Amino acid sequence: MSCDNGSTDVSNPTTAHVHKWGAWEETTAAQDSVKGEETRVCEDDKEHTETRDIPQLKSLITTVEVEAGKFIYGKNGAEAGGTLVEVQAFKMGKYLVTQEEWKAVMGADKNLSYFDGEKAFDMDDDYNEIKANPKFNRDNLPVETVSWYDVLVFANKLSMKEGLNPVYEINGKTDPAEWGEVPTGANDDDWDV
């Protein structure tokens, strides 16, 4: 028997076929702005498939749309012979990245922030250490004391987590797990390329 018309009606056993569906397999990954798609195949008739949408993901980062446009790139713009650059529309974080968002992407043990809630002090107006307010949710504070190299890892991990294509490459690889240790100093030849 075949699934000639995709019927699950078994009233006519000579032509009808009850599908034995395989597992749903992701066809297109869901993104924060686009629905994805998954498909399953009938085990008795591989040509019969069924497709359904995967709801779009909710991004970890609240973003705003930045319209496409042109700008002059270079010190002092056109006055110094800058270059006219055209950019496509893109999304940008609406707020500073919080420690909670950083930990959600990088891991709870990867928060490099100085004021991370683990330390039991704050600073007063004169930059003296004072006892921290235990009621204050430090996860809402911006992440700080991270390097540009740390941000490259964060950006690519966030893209991967949200089903987007990572942008940054090191030695031809976009997966930060393949980059090695994050440099602790400045001017790393491999990472600066």
Image (cartoon, helix red, strand yellow):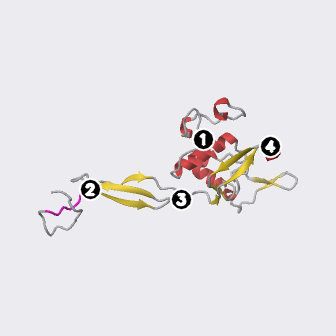
Alpha carbon distance from label 1 to label 3? 21 Å
Q: Which mark is residue 144?
A: none
Sequence-first disc among 2 and 1: 2
The residue at 56%/39% (across/down) is: 176
Alpha carbon distance from label 1 to label 4? 24 Å
The residue at 61%/46% (across/down) is: 154
Give the amino acid type for the residue marked by disc 3 in the picture: Ser
Mark 2 or 4: in front is 4
For label 3, the residue is: 33
Instruction: List x then y, in percent, for residue 10.
Output: 17, 67
The answer to which quarter of the image holds residue 96 is bottom right
Q: For mark 3, give the secondary structure.
A: loop
Mark 2 or 1: in front is 2
Sequence-first disc among 2 and 4: 2
Q: Are marks 3 and 4 in contact (CB under 8 Å)?
A: no
Number of numbered labels in the structure image: 4
For label 2, the residue is: 48
Give the amino acid type for the residue marked by disc 2 in the picture: His
**18 falls in the magenta region:** yes
Mark 1 or 4: in front is 4
The residue at 59%/35% (across/down) is: 170
As drawn, the residue found furthest toward the right would be 126
Q: Are marks 2 and 4 in contact (CB under 8 Å)?
A: no
Alpha carbon distance from label 2 to label 1? 40 Å
Give the residues in magenta: 15-21
- Circle 3 crowding by C-alpha within 10 Å: few under 14, some 14–19, many from 20: few
For label 1, the residue is: 168
Position of the N terminus, as image quadrant, is: bottom left
Alpha carbon distance from label 2 to label 4? 60 Å
